[in-house]
Image (cartoon, helix red, strand yellow):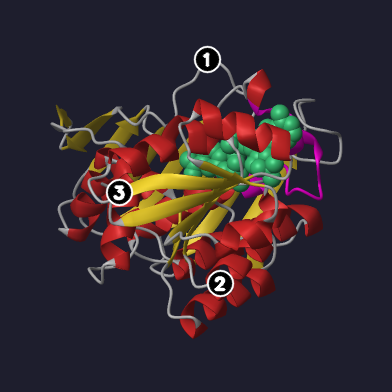
């Protein structure tokens, strides 16, 4: 017997194959039944490999299929047009980040969802991790006091399999701002429950990306609450853990190894010279994204990150990019 929600994929991507298809299929109420890829032969092979019943050769045919929800995870420049087409065809859409390459396109996605009364979510998966849910709780409960500053490092040596359009294609939205900054911005917005007001940034190129594209970024932002945040992101850093630190007037918290797709990592709360490790029951961030989205389709709550959250993270990344380009601070 088929499950309640049929999902289709726009994009025969690695993220779908490794994380999102398993999450959709393991949910009690959803399954992947269709895929559309720009290359029909690759789409059919992908469908066979992932036990997806139907592979479509055109977007129009895919959108006419009996599908409730669409996961858009092709290259970044296609997110907005394909999400809008799916929303207009009456599908709910879980889009990948960055939700679009421009604010205007992101706003059009939100309007298309509202006009067609469909659910729109963006897969900012970091906020679904147990570590970050705990950081959010620690901030919200007041246990840390008022938040003076925060620091985040997201440095990886980009694996060869992830190079290509992500490192070399300006048209496809390559570079750190669209790949890592949007995620980090969303996570900060979520944990600190505020938005950035002003951003400065610098970039570098360590020959991981094409010359005109940044592979390393340092950002300083002032949030609306007055909290100062520092973010270092890179495709060129090996031998380091990803980290988040929040510095409060009553206590500080250090979260180690917490920004990778697999989840995991540890959290330490520091207070009066003592450090205590928090007990964390880790969960799969993609399972939670799909579970929350399925619930939202059924009228219960909203996706873990909404279109409006995606727009905020995009605005932050574009402001940081503008600040790096001009050498001036940019107000949001
Ligand atoms: P991939 O490079 O695996 O796939 C992206 C697109 O590239 C595919 O949809 C496909 O286009 C095309 N493509 C894939 N393989 C080939 C090939 N062999 N030959 C030609 N074209 C190919 O990208 P990722 O899975 O790394 O990323 C996809 C999206 O997901 C991006 O927007 C990225 O930002 C986002 N992402 C999000 C993550 C998260 O945790 N939220 C993590 C990783 C990525 P088509 O299907 O149109 O044919």
Label 2: few (<14), some (14–19) or many (≥20) C-alpha neighbours in 10 Å: some
The single residue placed furthest to the right in the displayed view is: 211
- Residue at mark 3: 2
Q: Which residue is mark 1?
A: 239
Relative to 115, say whether 140 is above or below.
above
Judge by depth and name the residue closer to the eye, 251 or 53. 53
Instruction: Say which label, 3 or 2, has the lower sequence index.
Output: 3
Q: Which residues are magenta?
A: 162-179
- Residue at 43% over, 70% down: 224
Residue 58 higher or lower than 114, as above or below: above
Does the residue at mark 3 contact the one at mark 2 (Cβ under 8 Å)?
no
Give residue 60's position: percent from left, percent from top.
Answer: 66, 62
- Asked whether the residues under the numbered discs 3 and 1 touch, taking CB atoms below 8 Å apart as contact, a structural biologist would say no
| 123 left or right of 99 in image | left
Which quarter of the figure is the C terminus placed in?
bottom right
Which residue sits at x=52%, y=36%?
15
Where does label 2 land, which residue?
89
Which sits in the foreground, 189 or 307? 307
Residue 307 place in picture, x, y as percent: 48, 67
* The stretch drawn in magenta includes residue 264: no
Nearer to the camera, 88 or 141 = 88
């Amino acid at each position: 017997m088929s499950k309640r929600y049929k999902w289709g994929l726009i994009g025969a991507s690695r993220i779908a194959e490794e994380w999102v298809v398993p999450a959709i299929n393991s949910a009690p109420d959803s399954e992947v039944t269709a895929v559309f890829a720009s290359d029909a032969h690759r789409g059919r092979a992908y469908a066979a490999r992932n036990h997806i019943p139907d592979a479509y050769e055109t977007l129009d045919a895919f959108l006419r299929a009996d599908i409730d929800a669409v996961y858009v995870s092709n290259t970044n420049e296609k997110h907005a047009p394909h999400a809008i087409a799916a929303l207009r065809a009456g599908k709910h859409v879980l889009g990948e980040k960055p939700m679009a390459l421009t604010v205007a396109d992101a706003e059009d996605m939100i309007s298309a969802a509202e006009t067609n009364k469909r659910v729109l979510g963006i897969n900012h998966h970091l906020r679904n991790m147990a570590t970050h849910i705990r950081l959010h709780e620690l901030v919200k409960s007041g246990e840390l006091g008022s938040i003076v500053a925060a620091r985040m490092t997201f440095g990886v040596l980009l694996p060869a399999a992830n190079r290509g359009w992500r490192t070399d294609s300006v048209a496809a939205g390559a570079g750190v701002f669209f790949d890592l900054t949007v995620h980090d911005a969303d996570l900060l917005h979520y944990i600190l429950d505020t938005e950035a007001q002003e951003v400065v940034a610098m970039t570098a190129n360590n020959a991981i990306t094409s010359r005109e594209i940044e592979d390393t970024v340092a950002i300083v932002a002032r949030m609306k609450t007055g909290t100062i945040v520092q973010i270092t992101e890179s495709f060129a850093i090996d031998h380091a853990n990803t980290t988040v630190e929040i510095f409060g007037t009553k206590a500080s918290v250090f979260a180690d190894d917490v920004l990778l797709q697999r989840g995991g990592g540890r959290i330490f709360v520091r207070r009066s010279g003592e450090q205590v490790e928090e007990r964390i029951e880790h969960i799969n961030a993609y399972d939670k994204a799909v579970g929350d989205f399925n619930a939202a389709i059924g009228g219960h709550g909203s996706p873990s990150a909404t279109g409006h959250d995606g727009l905020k993270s995009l605005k932050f990344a574009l402001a940081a990019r503008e600040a790096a380009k001009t050498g001036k601070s940019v107000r949001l």
